[in-house]
Image (tube, grey):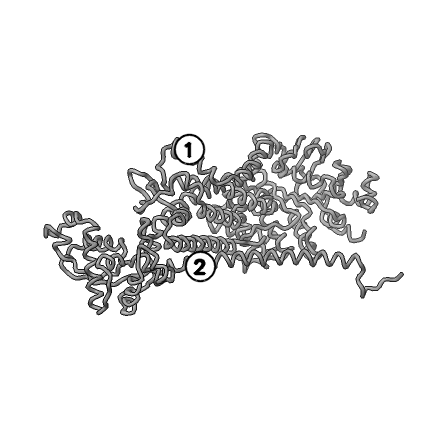
Amino acid sequence: MEDMVHVDRAMSTEQDIKISAKGVQVHYADTHAIRDVDVDIDDKTVTAFIGPSGCGKSTFLRCINRMNDTIDIARVTGDIRIDGEDIYDPKVDPVQLRAKVGMVFQKPNPFPKSIYDNVAYGPKIHGLARNKADLDEIVEKSLRKAALWDEAKDRLTAPGTGLSGGQQQRLCIARAIATAPEVLLMDEPCSALDPIATAQVEELIDELRRSFSVVIVTHSMQQAARVSQKTAFFHLGNLVEYDDTDKIFTNPQDPRTESYISGRIG
Amino acid sequence: MKTSLLASDARTKKRNAAEARFKAYGLSAIVVAMLALAILLTSVLTNGLSSFQQTFIALPVELSAERVDKQGNRDPAEMAKTTTIGYAPLLRDAIVAEVERQGLTTEMSDKDLGDMISKEAAATVRNRVLANPDLVGETVTFDLLAAGRIDGYFKGRVTLESAALDGNTSPEALMIAQELADAGVIETKFNWNFFTAPDASVQRPEAAGLGVAILGSLYMMLVVLFLALPIGVASSIYLEEFAPKNRITDIIEVNISNLAAVPSIVYGILGLAIFINFMEFNQSSPLVGGLVLTLMTLPTIIISTRAALKSVPPSIRDAALGVGASKMQSVFHHVLPLAAPGILTGTIIGLAQALGETAPLLLIGMVAFVREYPAAYTPEAGLFGEASTALPVQVFNWTQRSDPAFVERASGAIITLLVFLLIMNAVAIYLRRRFERRW
């Protein structure tokens, strides 16, 4: 457990609550995937969702930017608020929501276009750049934030799919942050990456915490311990325990959490 | 008992034998298919390649004024009163004179000598004279079509023995033709007319060409391309990406698959009922043909487009939606470009199928004998509204005529059709390679 702890957690105790979920239920046809989840996610914090496969952590993550809307059989009830606004209000257009809540997926999925176009796509469709110079600036800033600028600046016109796996995932992060989101959702962002690329992405996640509220789903408890300040443990669709990462890993309150982090279930 | 790895046991032997047998079945199937293809190509090519050659007689024709311009005023309107039949004696005199000039003797009558020239030749000369009245009174050398039997003799279709039994020619005529050929008067040249000339009557296979048929097929393909591609792709996108998945869309999906299997002649009856009887479009017009073929091609295009859309990984859709693209933007900016190679291939295969389709066209009157080139647009007939025929229908027509010269024409038309299909498939493969992207 030594490798789990060493992130500087010198954070102020009074964080603003960015996302607040109350009584969230998700059904896939007859399956009850998420049962009555309440969680408050802080701003400028990395929050990790851990739990065994099929526990609903990805499903819950996808509720936060309404990606579950694209699945016909999925039904979400309950109340999720970002900055106090109900994101499931009928007046909310999911397109605007997703510009505000960026997402990085499990498998790196750059568009089969140039690196530049990958990053520029979001700002373009949301009209964030008034001209080419603006767009260039956004692209450069996003790539810098994603720690990819130095590797990519000489080949912005090369296809994004030609990058290595880790670079592709950082490109996807750059693409997600190019629309200037406030929340960044990451669904097992390192599960398809080798240890070195994983380390780079984790370092990046820690950087991103300065600007965004980051929510990361991960299978790796070590990763959760390394990158997050708060951890939520999901089991069979229930949110079992949610607390500071230190507490979850050193002093879990629920026996199920303890079994999971000690490797007895999962 | 301990088993050795060096000797295979009975089970393994049986398994290997089954595998070897299956491979042999596959191989023999391929061999049979190749043989069938070889037989098809040999038969079509041996029969049809000669249609790309045509026999011409180079004759100096004296265009005497009293024959072609009786009024003597060189007015094309007046001269047009002399019909094609009026020109026939000019040509007869020309070939008789030519035979004499070459010092050949024959017992053939002047009329029989004249019959060595195609009946189409008189029309050729007349058209040239009407187009240029200054030629009247001069002696002009024309390359005139030889009659079908003479043409057949130089292509090996007609022999001295078969000519002896033939009422349309005689061994003497063939011998004269051979001597004229030795003297360089009769020549076999590449037959451009085959691709540009319209169909000709039953008596003059040597003049028959594919011009109208190619034009008609081209117009129909344009109609199909401009209707079937957008409608097919748009409906596939709607069904695949936007439509809710429920019982109704399931029924629609099953029915589209069924429509792809409906015999094409049924589409012909449908077209006859809707486009000709109800909407009163012109019979035999490429517009109606194109509409019928569009209906026939739509299921093919929709099925292949949906397959292409399905094969685009969902991660691309997620990626687009994840950065806040709308459903429509994600489809048109990302999914559609990735599906384009599959869509193009499906479309071109659909077009190729439509190009070779005969049955529905018979029902809407495209089987008619058409000698006028159809205009793409006329105020009376509208767009693609003039009567026309089509390549496969032309093949069908020619194979029904009794003169063996038409067998050659039909095979030539089949070769032309196959070449068009090959070109379309090559384009499909090229586009596929060109647009294929990895992700």
Mark carried by residue B49: none
The kind of residue tagged 2 is: Leu
**Mark sitting on residue B274:** 1
B434 to the left or right of B167: right
- Image height of B368 relative to B41, above or below: above
Tell which of A104 and B233 is nearer to you: B233
Asked if residue B157 shows in the view, the reply is: yes
Q: What type is the residue that disc 1 sits on? A: Ile
Task: Indicate which label's residue lies in the foreground, 2 or 1.
Answer: 2
Residue, disc 2: B45
Chain letter of mark 1 equals B
Q: Nearer the viewer, residue B69 or B228?
A: B69
x and y, in percent, of residue B416 in the image: 41, 54
Asked if disc 2 and disc 1 are in contact, CB closer than 8 Å, the reply is no
Residue B69 rendering spot, x and y as whole percentages:
13, 52
Give the residue at x 36% y 38%. B283
